[in-house]
Amino acid sequence: MPNHTFQLNGESVTVEVEDDVRLLWVLRDLLGVTGPKYGCGINVCKACTSHINGKAFNPCSVPVGAIQPNDQVTTIEGLADTAPGDGLHPMQDAWIANDVAQCGYCQPGQIMAAVAKVRQCRAEGREVDDEAIEELRNICRCGTYNRIREAIKAGAENM
Amino acid sequence: MPTHRAVTTRSRPTREPAHRADVKRRSFLGLLVAAPVLVTAAEIGRQTVFDSVPEASALAVPSPPQPAEVYDLLDVIRDSARPTANLITVKVNRDGTVSFALPRSENGQGIITSTQMIIAEEMNLDPDQVEVTLADARPELVFNQLTGGSSTTFSTYTPIRVAAALAQGRLLGAAANELDQDISVLTSRQGLITGPNGKSLPFGDLTTKAAAPVTEAANVVLKDREKFTVIGKNRTKSDALAMVTGRKKFTTDLKIPDALPTVICRAPDLNGYPRSVGNLEAIRAMPGVTDVVEVGNGVAVRARTYGQCVDAVNAVEARWAAGTVAGEDDESVLRKLRRGELPLAVPKGVGTTLESDTVFYFRSNSSLETNCAIADVRANSATIWGPSKSPIAAQNEIAKKLGIAQNAVTFHVMEGGGSFGRKLFFDAALEAAEVSQAMGKPVKLMWTRSDDSRQGRVHPMATTRIRANVTADAVASFEIRHTSVATETNPGLSEAITATAQKAPGGNLTVSESIWETTQVTPYNVGASTRLLSEVDMRFNTSSMRNIYSPDVATARELMVDRIAAQMGKDPYEFRSEFTKLERWKKVVDRAAQEGDWGKSMAEGTAQGIGMHVEYKGVACAVVELDCRPETVNRKIRQARTGPRVTRVTYVVDVGLVINPRGVRAQMMGGINDALAMTLTSSLHLTDGHFVEASWDNYFYTRQWNTPPEMNIIVVDDSDAPEPGGVGEFGVAATCGAIACAYARATGEQPTYFPLDHKDPLPFTPYPTSPPVPPSPTNGLETTF
Ligand code: FES
Ligand code: FES
C-alpha cells in the first residue's frame, strides 16, 4: 500500500492507504479528523468542505493520490490557527454570535465555504452580499440559511 | 344545520389573570431521594392549564370545540409521560454543579439549552452551571423517553421545575442551619447562598447536608413567573462552540475500538432483499474489506474506510427479490388512494358549494446526517450508540432481534444531525446490531446518501378534499377528508399514544386516528366542521416530517379559506381575523397582517398570501410575498430548482410561555424553510417500484438561492398561556398555507398538487439503482474557490 504525505492543519501527516481512496475517508476514518462531514459523497451537499492551499474544496471528491506532499489541507479543526491571535477565526465568532447552528452537522462545511467565499469576493473586488452568498451550495437541512447570511456578513467585516 | 349567527366578540375574560395566579400559587409535590448528595425528583398531579372554551370572535356560525382544541397530542404525550415523571431527577454535585440527565433526544432543537435554563431559573444559577446530558435508554421510564410531536418542553417543564425548586429549598434549609440564620433572610445566587452578614456557602458544601436520609415526598412552591430572570431571555446554544470548531461528536465521529465502517448493499426496489449473492468471496478480497455477510436487507460490508465499503457494495452481484411496491409509480399509488377516499357527508346545495381536491406527493425526511449507529454485540450483551428519539423501543426491538434480554442491551443516545421525525425510528441501530452479531465484530454502520434518499422513510403521499357550503355572510359547513398512505408510528410513540388516547374525547382510536384527532384543528368558525382521516397501507417506509398531516391539510385548508373569502367578497386577511375562533388566535392574525404590511401594492406576477395554523398549544400566522414573474421563475442555477421565489416572510407565533426566544425563532426559521421545500421544490418521484431521487442534486431541499431574503419572525412574549407549547414543527403549516395562497393570487391558478414543480421535467438524469451508490467523483480539485 502506498504512503501519502501532506500538510494537515499545519502538521505533516503520512498515511498508508490505496491511492484512490477519497481524502474525506482518509481524514475521517484513518486520521480521526471528523470535522468534515459526509452528506452525499458526490460533491453536492458540501458538508465536507475544507480548504486546500487556502481554497474551498470537497475532499469526498478528491483521491488521496492527487494530494501533493506540500499541499496544505485545512479542516474546521485547523481554521482558527489560520487567523491572527489565539482565539477563533472571525467567521467562527460570527457563527456563535448569531447562534447559527441548529444540529450543527452542516456547519463545519458552511463555515469553511463562507471563509473561502469572502476571500474570493475580496480577490475579485466584489461585495459579500446576498448575491455572493447565494452562490454557496452548502445544504443545511435544518434550514438555518438566514442566520448563515447574517453571520457571513458579520464575519466578513472582521476578516 | 345551524344557520343562526353567534353573538359577536366578547371582551377578554377577566378570569385569565386569576387563572394564571392560580397556577402561580399552587404547590406541587416533589420527592426527596435518599442519596449521599442532594437528589430531588418530581411527581406532579394533573393540571388543567389551557382554556378550552372557544369564544366566538366574529359574526359567524360557531363551530363547536374540536377534540384537538380540548385535548391535543401534547396532552396525550404528556399524560403518558406522567406516571413515570417522578423518575426525573436533579442532582447537586459536590463540586457545586447541578446535573440532570434529560430523557429526551437532541437533534438540534435546542432542548438541552432550554432545560439548563429551566433548572437555572428555579435554582438561581447561571445556565452554564447546569450540566444536562442525554440519558441512556432507561426502560423504567417507559413512555417518558420519547421525543416526538414537539412535546419535550411541554411535558417536562413542570416536573423539572418541581425537582429544581425542591433542591433549591433543601439547600437553603441546610444553609440556614449552617449559618444559623432564618431561611427568609438568605439569598441564593449563582450557586452561592449568602446570609445577611455576608457569609456565604457554595452549593457543593451544602449538598451532603441537604441530602435526604430517606426518600420522602415534599411540597414545593414554584417561582413566580414575574420573577423570572433566565426564562424568556435569549440564550445561545450550549454547544455552539463545539459545533463551530468541529468538536461536536456525532455517531460516526465516535472512535469505538474496532468499530470499522460498515455499509449495506441494498436492492434496486424499495424494500427489496437479496435472494442470492454470487461473488461474496471476490468482495471479501477487495481492498480494505474485512468482512462481508448477507443480512435481511442486503449485503453488509465492513472495511477500513467508508470509501472502500462503497466500492465493495457497488461490486456486489446479487439477485434481488422484488420490493413491497414493485412496479408501482406515483399515478398507481394515487389510484389506490382514490379508492380509499371517504365520502363528504354534507350534501351540496346549502348556499354555494365550494370543493377542492389536492394531491401531496412523497417527500423525503432525510436529515443531513444519514441513518447510522454503532453496535458491539457480544455473546449475551449488546452496546449500541446512535441517535434515537425512542431508545427504549429500540432497546426492546434490538433485544428481540438478537435473542437476548432487554436489559442486556445498552443504548447510548447520541445527539443526531437533524431528525424531522425520522429518528423516531431506529432502522440503522437495528441493522447495526444484526450485522455486528453476524460478523461477530463491532461495526459503525452508516447509510449512504442514496440509501437514505431511496430506501429511507418518507412523508406519505396524500390527498386532501374539502367541501364548504357558503351563504352570503357565513360558512354553514366545512369538511375535510384526508386520505394518506399509512404513516408508521414507531413502537415508542404508538405505545405512548394508545396507552393514553383512551382518555381523549372519543377514545378508543387507532394510533394514526389518535394523532389525527389530537392534532387537527380547523381554526375558524365555519359551521359544521368535520375532519376525517383514512389511511391506505401501501408498505412504504413512512414517518412524520416536522409533523405528519398538518402542513398538507393546512395548505388545502388555507387555499379553501381564500376561496370562501372571495365568494363572500372579503379580503383574505379580514376573513381570517373575523372568522377565527379565539381572541388569542385573532391577535396573532392581526399582528402578522400588520407586521407583514398586508395589502400593500404588489407588482404584477407577485402577490402576498396569508395562512394561519393552530396546534401545539399555540397559534401561528404567516404572511408571505411570492414572486412568480417569468424572469424569477426561469432563472438558471446549475443542478438546482428555481421556480417561484418567496421574497419575504413575516411569521408571528404565540407558543405560550417562551423559555428561549432565540431557540423558538430558530425553530420557526427551520420550519419556514421546510415549508418552501414542501410547497415549491422538494418531492420524491416513485417510478417502477423505487424512488428516483438519490441525492441532494436530485432532491431539492431549500438552498441559499431559494430562501427568503427577508424573514421576520415575531415570538409573542406576553402570551396568555401559562405553560410552554411545542415549537419544533410549528413553523411549517402556516407558511405552507400562505405560500399556496400567494401562488393562487399571483398566478390566478388554483394549484391541485404539491410541490408545485412535481410534474415538471426532471432537471437531472437519474442515477442507476444498480450499482446502488453513485461513485464519488475524482475531479474535486477542479471545483475549488
Ligand atoms: S460529502 Fe462532500 S460534498 Fe457532500
Ligand atoms: S444545522 Fe443541521 S443541517 Fe445545518
Image (tube, coloured by chain):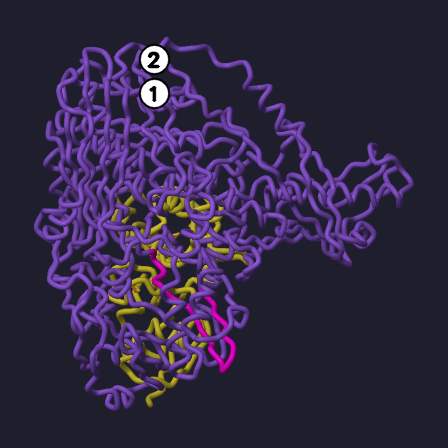
Q: Secondary structure at mark 2?
A: loop
Q: Chain of mark 1?
A: B
Q: Amino acid at mark 1?
A: Thr
Residue B477 in magenta stretch: no
Q: Identify residue for label 2.
A: B58
Residue A44 position (above or below residue B580): below
Find the magenta span and give its range.
Answer: B367-386
Residue B580: mark: 1
Eyeballing the image, is B437 above or below B533?
A: below
Kindly report the distance in space between the C-alpha atoms of the residues bearing marks 1 and 2: 7 Å
Q: Position of residue B155 (x, y in %)?
A: 52, 42
Q: Residue lying farthest left?
A: B761
* Viewer-nearest residue: A1 or B563: B563
Closer to us: B742 or A54: B742
Residue B99: percent from left, percent from top: 65, 53
Query: Are there few (<14), some (14-19), or many (20+) residues within 10 Å of tag 1?
Result: many
Q: Give the secondary structure at mark 1.
A: loop
| Chain B color in figure | purple
Residue B590 in the image, given as x and y percentages of width and height:
36, 19
A108 versus B621 height, above or below: below
Disc with the residue nearer the chain's start (1 vs 2): 2
Q: Are marks 1 and 2 in contact (CB under 8 Å)?
A: yes
Tell whether position B381 is magenta: yes
Residue at 47% across, 44% down: B500
Residue in the foreground of this view, choosing between B28 and B680:
B28
Amino acid carrying label 2: it is Ala
**Colour representing chain A:** yellow
Write down the quadrant of residue B454 in the picture. Answer: bottom left
